[in-house]
Every structure is written in C-alpha cells, then in structure tokens.
C-alpha cells in the first residue's frame, strides 16, 4: 500500500502538535517525575525521538531499495525500548526537546525525498510508516496529567 506523501507529512506534523499541546504548561519537575507508568514524560520524549530517528533511517533505506532493518518480535521491541530508556533516562529536558525537534526534522525530510518504494507502507517493520505511535504517547500524557491534576 503506497502512502500519500502529503498525507504522511500532515499526519506527522499533526501528531507533533498534539504531543506539544499535551505538554503545554508542564514544568521541569513535572517532566522528570517518573510517575507516568514508571517513566517520566522526559523518558517518553526521548523514546519518541529515538523512534523518529529509526523511522527516518527506514524511509531512506527502503527508498534506496533495501529491506527493512526493523522487523522484530515483541520481545525484541521490548528489549530495545528498555535499552533506549536506560541510555536516555539521565539526560536533560532541554536535550529531550532538542532531540524531539531534530528527529522530527529528519523524519519529515526523509518523507519529503522518499521514492515511491519508500512510501510503500507494506515494506516496513516495527518502525511503521503509517504509525500512530506519537498519538498513543500524547494520550498517555493527557491521561497522566488528568490523574495528577496537572
């Protein structure tokens, strides 16, 4: 299934707007509080940035005629997410927002220059081209805020 480039760009921009709206008004202490299902909001931001980087590389890789490098089992996905958490959990809020901005720029640039093959969603593994990943995290953050009274 070939995805429409403009729809993808619009979707990824809209998801980022939704995420940033979910973060609006949170201070550094709230962003680093590890009470969002055991992670902090900051941890979620690094997680999303890492997956944006991975997804951008996938778009470039598949556009170049290569196979997905991110077909994995549920256990592998969980292990990767745990490793990414361990590697990023001590990094600053400022860096999280920098990574989030930079990774999304790279993903949008990859989509903008993707070949027709790179827009074929059926060729992707865990770093799916038609992802709703960020919407899920924004929803979890909104739920957490409501529970905490933030």
Image (tube, rainbow, N blue to C red):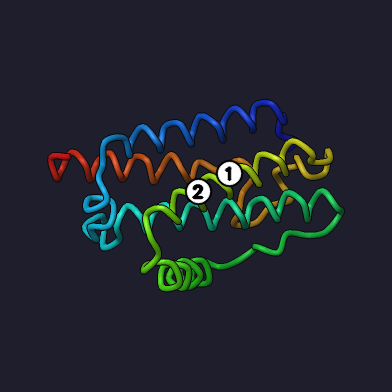
Which residue was labeled with disc 2? Answer: 100
Instruction: Residue at the far left: name it.
Output: 149
Q: Residues within 10 Å of mark 1 (few under 14, many from 20)?
A: many
Query: Horizontal placement of 44 versus 133: left or right?
Result: left
Residue 62, given in percent of the width and then of the height, sits at: 79, 52
Q: Which image quarter: residue 129? A: top right
Q: Between 27 and 58, which is closer to the camera in this rendering?
A: 27
Q: Which residue is at a point 65% across and 45% down the rendered structure image? A: 107
Q: Between 118 and 32, which is closer to the camera in this rendering?
A: 32
Residue 119, given in percent of the width and then of the height, sits at: 75, 40
Residue 42, given in percent of the width and then of the height, sits at: 35, 55
Point out the image quarter for the N terminus.
Answer: top right
Q: Which residue is at a point 30% across and 61% down the rendered structure image? A: 39
Residue 104 circle label: 1
Q: Which residue is at a point 14% across and 45% down the rendered structure image? A: 148
Distance from disc 2 to disc 1, alpha carbons, whole Å, reads: 6 Å
Instruction: Residue at the far front: name it.
Output: 94
Report if the CB atoms under discs 2 and 1 are less than 8 Å apart.
Answer: yes
* Location of residue 64 with respect to 9 vertically, above or below: below
Q: Residues within 10 Å of mark 2 (few under 14, many from 20)?
A: many
Q: Between 99 and 123, which is closer to the camera in this rendering?
A: 99
Residue 22, given in percent of the width and then of the height, sits at: 33, 36
Query: Horizontal placement of 68 versus 105: left or right?
Result: right
Point out the image quarter for the C terminus.
Answer: top left
* Location of residue 53 with respect to 80 vertically, above or below: above
């Amino acid at each position: 299934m070939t995805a429409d480039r403009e729809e993808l760009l619009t979707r990824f921009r809209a998801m980022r707007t939704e995420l940033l709206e979910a973060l609006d008004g949170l201070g550094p202490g709230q962003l680093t509080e590890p009470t969002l299902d055991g992670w902090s909001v900051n941890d979620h931001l690094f997680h999303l940035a890492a997956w944006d980087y991975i997804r951008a590389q996938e778009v470039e890789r598949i556009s170049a005629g290569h196979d997905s490098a991110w077909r994995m089992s549920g256990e592998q996905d969980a292990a990767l997410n745990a490793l990414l958490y361990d590697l990023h959990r001590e990094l600053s809020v400022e860096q999280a927002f920098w990574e989030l901005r930079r990774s999304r720029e790279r993903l949008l640039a990859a989509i903008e220059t993707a070949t027709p093959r790179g827009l074929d969603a059926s060729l992707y593994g865990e770093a799916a081209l038609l992802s709703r990943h960020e919407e899920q995290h924004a929803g979890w953050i909104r739920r957490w805020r409501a529970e905490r009274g933030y």
